[in-house]
Image: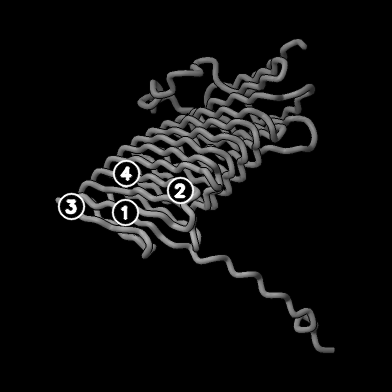
Amino acid sequence: MSAHAWTVAEPQKISFDGPVTALHVRIVGGTVNVVGTDEGAARLEVSAIEGPPLIVTHDGGRLTVGYEDVPWKGLLGWLDRKSWKREAVVSLAVPADTRVEVGTVGATAVVSGVCGDTAVHGVSGDTTLVGLSGPVEADSVSGNVEAQALSGDLKFSTVSGDLTVIEGTGSNVKADSVSGNMVLDLDPSAGAAVQLNTVSGDLAIRIPEPGDAEVDANTASGAVSCAFGELRVTDQWGAKRITGRIGHGAARLKATTVSGAIALLRRPPLEPAEPVDAPSLRKDV
């Protein structure tokens, strides 16, 4: 299959004939929004662009969107080039099983509905991940990462960005940070391994009641809070540690911070929705 290329210097929509199995995007400034879908051909919409044009290529199953002068590796070199004013607002719809890789500098990234491998590399922009069922890798320098309804493995690393995970049910979570905080609402599957490490960031982990995890959490000089009476909290020479088993201990949770605080919170069981009283919705005649 021959390659096709477009130079996009103004707002434009493009539909791609043929399969798309891998997507690579590099954006400096602006927003990139990637949505996995099971309907129709892959589509691109550039709704705003300022500065150099975007180069779009479709070669076999590989779709790329980026700039001629921005390398696929070495995005950190762009951190101080603030005088190079550019911005683009890019939206893509691709097959849900596409392998997605997004790199951003000072741009916001949103990826949703993808079940293939997903990787997001950000320098200073925030990232939002929603409804991803494949393995996810996210790293940033100072950008925050928010994830909701992830059911695949998650690997996260940052210098100062925060990590927030809501409704995480993946098998494995590995997160490393220097000063970023981590707030995780987890319901890990049996056999799951959750490993969190930070130097000075705070860690807050919420586990559903009754819970089912083997816990080992410690801080060298930070405060600790634990809502599970079955866990042990020890304090020796200022270092505090939370250990023990919740339920059958089917998952493993290990959390470490040097000077940050650690909080283990209990999430109440979800209450069943109350049935709707249909007659009460009727208006009096």
Earlier sequence position, callout 3 versus callout 4: 3
Q: Determine contact: label 3, label 2, CB under 8 Å.
A: no
User: Which picture quadrant has residue 256?
Assistant: top left
Q: Determine contact: label 2, label 4, CB under 8 Å.
A: no
Earlier sequence position, callout 1 versus callout 3: 3
> Above or below — where is 216 with respect to 7?
below
- Residue linked to disc 2: 164
User: Where is residue 135 drawn, in percent x and y?
Assistant: 57, 34
Earlier sequence position, callout 3 versus callout 2: 2
- Residue linked to disc 1: 242
Screen quadrant of the C terminus: bottom right
Answer left or right for 24 relative to 268. Answer: right
User: Where is residue 179 drawn, in percent x and y?
Assistant: 30, 41
Screen quadrant of the N terminus: top right
Q: How is the image coloured?
A: one colour
Q: Nearer the viewer, mark 3 or mark 4?
A: 3
> What's the residue at 66%, 18% (across, down)?
57
Q: Alpha-carbon distance for marks 2 and 4?
A: 17 Å
- Residue linked to disc 3: 236
Q: Alpha-carbon distance for marks 1 and 4?
A: 10 Å
Which SS class for mark 3? strand
Q: Determine contact: label 3, label 4, CB under 8 Å.
A: no
Answer left or right for 255 relative to 131. Answer: left
Earlier sequence position, callout 2 versus callout 4: 2
- Residue linked to disc 4: 256
> Above or below — where is 92 with respect to 56?
below
Residue type at mark 3: give it. Gln
Q: Alpha-carbon distance for marks 3 and 4?
A: 16 Å
> What's the residue at 42%, 31% (across, down)?
123
Q: Residue furthest left?
A: 237
Q: Nearer the viewer, mark 1 or mark 4?
A: 1
Which SS class for mark 1? strand
